[in-house]
Amino acid sequence: MHEKSKIRLEEILAEHERLRAQAAVQLEEDARRTATFMDRFERMKDSIIRPVLEETCETLAARGHEAWLEDGSTGADERIKDARVSLLVTPRRSDGLRTDSGRVMFYAERGRHRIGVNGTYRGGISTMGEYDPDEVTRDLVEDKVLEVVERVFAPLH
């Protein structure tokens, strides 16, 4: 190989190594940011979201309706597998009044580091929003929960 070609090959390989190192640093940074976001979601779930869902669940149960929480799970390595929490609601049956079950779910959107909200009622799923963690307040959680509860308790026609 000519000297000029050897130099060019070395330059190509050096650039490739630089890009590989840069990609490794970026992957580490992305993993760190995602872990930080997931930890933040878990804290928000415990301090903001879950208390609203629990209060709603208790109120509904006290009135004879079925309501329960479902939480995300962790794997054997204690890493979060499914970062979400849901309130499921089934109104008490009444003669002459048809209703349906529903769910409101708050979940961590890992890829975009946002918190999503879905509502399920009347056999369909509604995306109710995706929020920056700073936007998720008790008021927002209460509004989303009540939106689903209102739709679940509306009579079917």
Image (cartoon, rainbow, N blue to C red):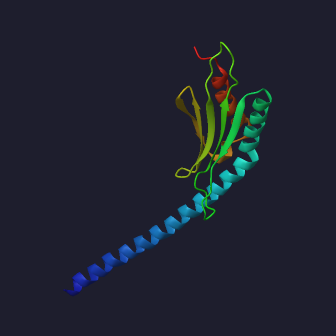
- The x and y percentages for residue 43 are 71, 52
The image quadrant that residue 1 belongs to is bottom left
In this view, the residue farthest toward the left is 1
Q: Say if 156 sits above or below 38 in the image.
A: above
Between 94 and 151, the residue placed more toward the observer is 94
Q: How many marks?
A: 0
Q: Say if 117 sits above or below 156 in the image.
A: below
**Horizontally, is 75 left or right of 15 in the view?**
right
Q: Say if 13 sits above or below 98 in the image.
A: below
**Horizontally, is 106 left or right of 63 in the view?**
left
Task: Give the position of the C terminus as an image quadrant.
Answer: top right
Tell me the residue at 76%/48% (across/down): 47
Tell me the residue at 63%/35% (across/down): 104
Between 110 and 15, the residue placed more toward the observer is 110
- The x and y percentages for residue 41 are 66, 51
Tell me the residue at 63%/49% (across/down): 72
Tell me the residue at 31%/81% (across/down): 10
- The x and y percentages for residue 95 are 68, 14
The image quadrant that residue 36 belongs to is bottom right
Q: Say if 32 sits above or below 154 in the image.
A: below
**Horizontally, is 129 left or right of 140 in the view?**
left
- The x and y percentages for residue 80 are 61, 57
In this view, the residue farthest toward the front is 95
Between 57 and 127, the residue placed more toward the observer is 57
The image quadrant that residue 21 belongs to is bottom left
